[in-house]
Amino acid sequence: MTEVKQALPDQSGKLISQLKSDDGFHLPNQSEETWVEVIRQMDRVYGELVQSQIALEEKNAELESAQEFIGSVVSSMTDLLIVCDTDGLIQQVNDALLRLTGLNAEMLVGQPLTEVLKGRDDEIQNRFQHHLRSNETFHDCEVLLRKQANPIPLSLNCSIRHDSHGEPAGLVLIGRPVGELQQAYRELDEALRNFEKAQKHLVSSEKMAALGRLVAGVAHELNNPISFVFGNMYALKSYGEKITRYLNAINDGTSQDTLTTMRQELQIDRIAQDILPLVDGTLEGAERVSDIVQDLRRFSGNQVEPAETFAVEPVIQTAINWVLRGSKDKPDVTVSCPPGLMVDAKKGHIHQILVNLLQNALDALSATPKALIRIDVEATDDAVVIDVSDNGPGIPEDALDQIFEPFFTTKPIGKGTGLGLYVSYRMADELGGHLSAVTLPEGGARLRLAMPTASGRDAT
């Protein structure tokens, strides 16, 4: 193009020379200048045509590149694509649709969309037709692809296509076979079930790990009432032997004087006074063993536990005993709880949360002199709040948002599973409450269990 443009002035010079040749023809000077100006204007117009041609070729190249890009995107889609105009005539389909149907584009392009797709029933068909006529979007509409022997059920989403002026130019429909969606849903459901199963396994494993850490305390808790029961039973056995001897003597017709002597020797009167308290004490010890076993079942079992009404302070004391009995260095523990405070909740959940919070505080105090744990209980009309505070090093600022996440721990490797607070957080949520943590300004940390009372739950 440049060579052509550069050659143009040379051609105009030759033309002028020919006009001035020896044939005797001469142009006046003014006419000569006019012709030169005309040729120059022709040169300018030709140059503009050349530039326009270059720009047009560049635009064509950009257009071809964009068309190739769009074509490659459309052909690589795994979802089905159908584009139609405002009259519902199909303008374009993608390779995924052709592969699914075994048809070619010529058999579909130009066909009415309603001939290719049909609703499963009249209601869906009418809704489908309404959306097409009004150019409205719709989502998750199930239709049948009918251009083959066995119609294929599809799940479609539709959006409006606009022209350069913003006016509706047709519809774009994207979908996939319902069978593929159902398979994806089945796989998702199976993955969710596996996740829930793994989560339950983790919770159960953490319960057993926590129980293993507390075995010494639990053993001591069981040993006391069992020893009490054994001691009482030995005494009752001795009392029973003496009473049996005395009763046999009465049945054998022993004289009154002899019976009086036996009564004094066998201490029958003292036995009569002591036997009922011994029985009551034995029953109390057995009930205590039963309570501890129930606590163990709540702590380690996976059964669904119903809510019950119980006193808070005994549960706190049991959790303290479980944790501290197995500890070498025992911190001072203070409890501030309204006397006789009753709550309606899952006793096992609260017990395990308290055990986990106390164990966490105890671990944090391992290097703290004059270690102290405070348990403060506050009750309002609609909530009960239990604070477990310590005077340890506190919780690092960057860990506050993560301590309730599974497997997160600030303890050395082998010293913690990172599941205790996570399990406690989930249990607090099941109670309808909330578990939170803060680092105290004076040092140490506070973990707070806030749970609604019966009136608080009714209000929500």
Image (cartoon, grey):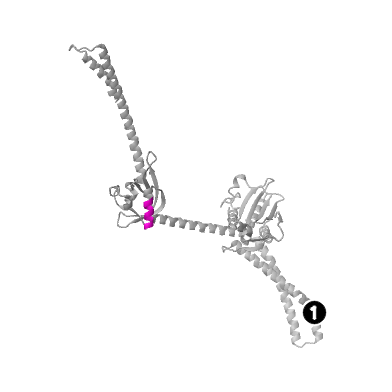
The three-letter code of the residue at mark 1 reads Glu
Residue 251 on image: x %, y %: 74, 86
**Outermost left residue:** 23
> Relative to 239, is 123 above or below?
above
Q: Is residue 121 magenta?
A: yes
> Relative to 214, is 175 above or below?
above
Where, by quadrant of the figure, is residue 378 drawn? bottom right
Overall secondary structure of the magenta section: helix
Q: Residue at x 34, y 33 (%)?
A: 59
Q: Quadrant of the N terminus?
A: top left
**Outermost bottom residue:** 253
> Dot 1 corresponds to which residue?
265
Side of 137 relative to 446 (left or right): left
In the image, 31 versus 457, the foreground residue is 31
Q: Is residue 79 visible?
A: no
> Relative to 290, is 360 above or below?
above
Residues rendered magenta in the picture: 120-130
Residue 412 on image: x %, y %: 60, 50
Label 1: few (<14), some or many (≥20) within 10 Å?
A: few
Residue 450 on image: x %, y %: 63, 54
Q: Is residue 170 visible?
A: yes
Kind of element beneath mark 1: helix
In the image, 143 versus 367, the foreground residue is 143
Residue 327 on image: x %, y %: 67, 56
Q: Quadrant of the C terminus?
A: bottom right
In the image, 60 versus 88, the foreground residue is 88
Q: Is residue 77 magenta?
A: no
